[in-house]
Amino acid sequence: MGSDLYRAIIDGILYGGVYALMAVGLTLIFGVLDIINIAQGILVVLAGYLSYVLSVHLHIDLFLGLLVTIPVMFLIGVGIQVLFMRRLRGRERTSMSLLASYAVMIIIEGVLYLVFGPDYVQLNASYVNDSVRVLGFYLPYIYLYGFGLAVILVTALYLMLYRSGFGRSLRATMQDQTAARLVGIDINRVAALAFGIGVAVTAVGGMVFGATNAFNPNSGYDLISRLLAIIILGGMGSIGGALVAAVFMSVTEAIVDIWSPTWSVVVFYVALVIVLTFRPQGLFGQREARAQ
Amino acid sequence: MSGGANSDSGRVVGIMRWRPGRPALSGSARNGIAAAVLMVLAVIFPLVITNPVATQIGVDTMLFVAATVAWNLFSGFTGYISLGHAVFFGTGAYVVGIAAQDWHITGDMEFALLPLAALAAGVVAVPFGLIALRARRHTFVVITIAIFFIFQLMAFNLAITGGSVGIPAPFLTWAPETFNNPFYYMALALAAGVAVLSWLIRGSRFGLQLRAIRDDEGRARGLGVRAMHVKLVAFVISGVVTGLVGALWFFFIGQVLPQYGFDPLFDLSVALMAFFGGFGTLWGPILGALILEPGEQYLTLQVSNSYASELVWGSLFLLVILFLSRGVTHVAGEIATAWRTRRERRQAGPQPVGASLAADVAIPRPEPGALSEEVLDKRATAD
C-alpha cells in the first residue's frame, strides 16, 4: 500500500510536469491577450498527430521531430491570432474570443477526423516502453524525458518572461495594453508572438501525451477540460499557479486511481469546485484583477 | 483595442430599432403582428408539409428555439455567457429516463414525468449557479465548462446512468407517419411559452435589473440591485426550460447516451444561434434557431460525411463570430434605419441638421446620414 502511494505520487509529479507545460501556454495566452484559447486541447492532439506523421512516415525520432513540430505549432498559433483573434473588437471581445477559439477547435477536429479518421493511434519509440529502475521504482524513460523537457521549457519561458526585454514588453501588455502602447510597445507583435509561444509548447505536450496515451481527434475535449480546470484552479494568468495545479491534479488522479480508476478524474473536478466555492479567483489568482 | 462601449452603441441602436418609424404602427404592434404571423405559420407547418423528414427537422428546430431563447434569457440578458447549459439538458433527459425505468412507466404516461425534469434541472441549477455566478466574465465561462465536464464524466461513470450504454426511453406505439406531430406541438408550445416569458421578463423590473448587471454589475449593485439573487433566478429559469427541452428531446429520440445528453456541441449551437440572430435581443435567438437548425440539418443530409459537416459548421460559426457577432437582426435593423432615414430626408428636402435629427432618433451625431457603427465605435472608444 505504502509503495503504491509513493509510486502514484512520483507518477503524478512526472506526468504533472507535462500538463503544466500545456497549461502554462494556455495561461500565458490568457494573461497577455485576455483570451481563453479553447483550441489548446485540440492543438495538443494536432501536435501529437504531427509527431505521429514524422515518426511513422518519415522515421524521424520523436524528440528530433520536435525541431519541426515546435516551429510549425508556433506558426499555427501566430496564424490563429492574426487571422481570427485580432479581428475581435468590443466589450464582449473576451467572450467572443472564447467562442471563436471554440470554433477553431471544431474546425481542427473536423480536419483531423477527415485526415486520420476516428481510430486511436499512439506514438512509439524504443524509450516509450523501456523504463529505468530508480530507488526501487520502475520509471518509463518517456515520462522522465518528458518531465525533463517540460522543466527546461517552463524554466526557459520563465526566464524569457522575467529576464528579457521581450518578456518585459509581454508583462507590460499583460498589465495594461493602452499604457504599453503609449510607451512604444508594438502590442500587435507582442500579442502574435505570445499566442505563438503559448501554442508552440503544445508541440512538446502533444508528443509526450501521444507517447503515453492512445489518442484520436476526440481526445481534445478531455485535454481542454483538464487544462481549463488547471488554469482556473491555479488562478487564471498565474504561471506558478498553473504549475502547482497541474502537479496537484496529476498526483490526486494517480492516488485515487489506486482505488477507483473511474473516479480518479472526477475527484479532481470536485476538488476544483470546492476550491472555487471559497476562492472564485483560484489559488493564486488576483480577485477581479483585470476588470475593465 | 477598443475594449470600451462598443456594445453600448449596439444597445442604443437596438432600442432605436423598436421605436416607431411610421407613426401609424407602434413597434410593439409590429412585434405582435410578426409574432402572430410566425405562430400561425408554425402551427400549420406540419399540417401542410407532412413529410416525416421535414417534421422531424421541425421538432428539432422548435426544441432549439426553446433552448436558445432560454439560454438568451440568462446569458443574453445578463452578459454571462454560459457554456454549461447542456448540464440542464442532460439532467432533464436522464432524470425522466431513470424515473421511467425505475417506476416502470410506459407509453404516453412518460409525459407525466415532464415536471420532474423541470424540477431536477432547477435543483441542479441552484448549486451550479451559486458556485459559478461568483466569478465573472471568462472565469464564469470556464467554470461552466468545467462543471459541464463533471456531469458528462458522471453520466459515463455512474451506475445509475447506465454508463456508456445510456438509458432507453419508454416505447411509444404511435403511427409512424404522424409520430412527429405531437412532439412538434409540444416543442412549439414550450418555445412559444419561453418566448413570451422572455418578453415579459425583458420589459419587467427584473429584466431591467438583469440588463443593468450586463452593462455594469458594480454600478447595478451600487444602485441596490441584489445581483447574485437576480442572476441566480434568471439562471434557474433558464435551466428549468433547458431541462424540459432535454426531456422532450429524450422522449423524441428514444435514448440518451452520455456524449449526446451532455454534448459540448449543444452549448456551442445554442450560443451560435443566439449570436447569429442577435445576442440579448428578443427576436434574435428565435430567428437564429429558425434559420440555423434547419440549415444544419439540411447540411447534414446533403453532406453524408459527418466530419465534413462538422468542419462546415465550425467554419460557419467562426464567420458569424468574426463578421456578424451583433446578429442578423441587428444588421438588418441598421440597414432598415439607414434606408428610412434617407427616405425621410429626401421627402423633407434640404433642412437644417437639427430638424432631421428630431424627426429621427435622439442620437447626437456629427453628420446626418453617417449613423454607421464606425462613428459610434469611434465615439465609444474616445470616452
Image (cartoon, rainbow, N blue to C red):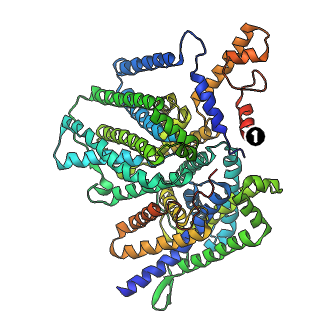
Q: Residue at x 47, y 29 (%)?
A: B203
**For this view, does A285 lie left or right of residue A249?**
right
Taking the image as drawn, is residue A277 in sight?
Answer: yes
Question: What residue lies at 57% left-to-right and 71% top-to-bottom?
Answer: A243
Q: Residue B365 at x, y = what percent?
A: 74, 26
**Quadrant location of the N terminus of chain A?**
bottom left
x, y (%) of residue B335?
A: 65, 23
Q: Nearer the viewer, residue B332 or A8?
A: B332
Q: Does residue A86 appear to the left or right of B157 in the view shown?
A: right
Image quadrant where residue A255 sits = bottom left
Q: Secondary structure at mark 1?
A: helix
Q: Is residue A4 above or below residue A162?
A: below
The number of numbered discs placed on residues in the rendered structure image is: 1
Which percent across, then down, holds residue B100?
21, 45
Could you say where residue A35 lies in the image, as x and y percent from the top left?
A: 62, 53
Residue A211 visible in the picture: no
Q: Residue furthest left?
A: B104
Within 10 Å of the Cα at label 1, are there few (<14), some (14-19), or many (20+) other Cα atoms? few
- The residue depicted at 47 percent of the width and 43 percent of the height is B306
Name the residue nearer the viewer: B138 or A49.
B138
Residue drawn at point x = 67 percent, y = 75 percent? A155
- Report the amino acid beneath label 1: Ala
Q: Which residue is mark 1?
A: B382
Give above or below for B172 relative to B84.
above
